Image (tube, rainbow, N blue to C red):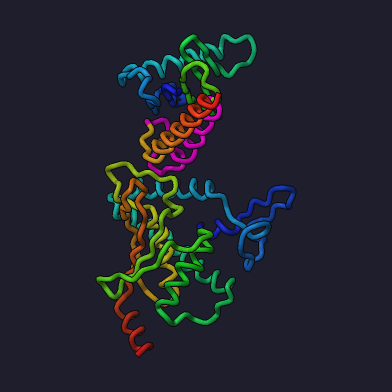
Amino acid sequence: MFLHLFVISRSGGLIYNKNLSSSAPRLTVNEWLVLGSTFHGLHSIAAQVAPLASSGIEKLECDNLKLQCFQSRTGVKFVLTAEPGTPDLDNVLHGIYELYADYVLKNPFYEMDMPIRCDLFQQGVERLIERNSRELKKARSDA
Amino acid sequence: MTESKRNAGSGGGGIRMLNILDRPLATKGRGVGGSEVSLSAFSFLFSEMVQYYQNRVLSIADLERKLEEAGYGVGHRVLELLAFREKQYRREIKLIGVLQFVSSTVWKALFNKVADSLERSTENEDEYMIHEREPITNVFVSAPADISQLNCAAYIAGIISGVLNGASYPAGVTAHHVAIGDGQREKTVFLIKFRQDVLRREAALSG
């Protein structure tokens, strides 16, 4: 089950957030912003304190949460959280990245580093999550 | 610009890249040699064009006019090129013929499909409509709520107008959003309004 989606700009601002399931904790606007920029900070600390060249946090696994981050070439971070045991966050993150590249970057009305308000991106994300949730459920009931 | 959609080929896979100007003009269709430009390349360029105009106009109507003007020149060239490629050296003298040329030949050349439908307006004799579910100019565009009436397909409307004017069927063409319900995306209708003398000529020819 997917929980939350954050998209963080290269300067650390939250540019898109979405609750992906009804069981995910509801966050206020402020909490979203704080969590988004806190993760950005942790991410860059992790990259700097690593003994070898590092691209920062990619995965976090806890008892009751799984978090995965995908950073694009330009430094935009896509962060997805899910219940533990959810496989394949990679695929979903790449799908969201693709939607971002298509429906946000090719939209003449989007300004870089500003919050994303693109209907088509929103619809695309909803469809992607719905499809993946359905597959997850099916895989679980088959098992 | 739209024309380059056909010419710039992928050319990858070990095939020698050919400069766009070195390709034979008569090549058409897909595949190696004469081919299409990627939708992304077009979309980025088009997006920049819209942004460029957006900073230089005061109203949405002006922006649409600018896009139409940009398409107009493309329309002229497309007509010339297609007449050459399709070897249609004779002038089209039937109104319906020229409309079909636009909705099938031109559409196929530019978008690799035919238009979804071509209709005559029931209210006005001089008006025709071409319906298009998803014009390529709108594939990635979501306009903010305050300018939701803007339709970037105005660029395509300009192309149509360029083709028709070039073919001696002067007409004003505008692009409009039309809701189709059941939660689907709005489709686009290109409204073609011919000049009065075009209809008079048509009547004289058929009468």
User: Can residue A103 be found in the magenta stretch?
Assistant: yes
Q: Residue B135 occupies which quadrant of the picture?
A: bottom left
Residue A71 in view here: no
Q: Identify the residue shown where x is 63% and y is 16%.
A: A53
Q: Quadrant of the C terminus of chain B?
A: bottom left
Q: Nearer the viewer, residue B76 or B40?
A: B40
* Tally of numbered discs: 0
Q: Relative to residue B53, is residue A133 drawn left or right?
A: right
Residue B117 horizontal/vertical position (percent)? 41, 64
Residue, x 33% and y 73% (percent of image)? B194
Horizontal side of residue A90 vs A128, given as left or right: right
Can residue A31 be seen here? The reply is yes
Region in magenta: A89-115
Judge by depth and name the residue closer to the eye, A87 or B91. A87
Residue B28 in magenta?
no
Residue at image x 32%, y 57%? B176
Residue at image location 73% in from the left, 52% down from the top: B16
User: Is residue B97 toward the left or the right of residue A27 in the image?
Assistant: right
Residue A98 on image: x %, y %: 51, 36
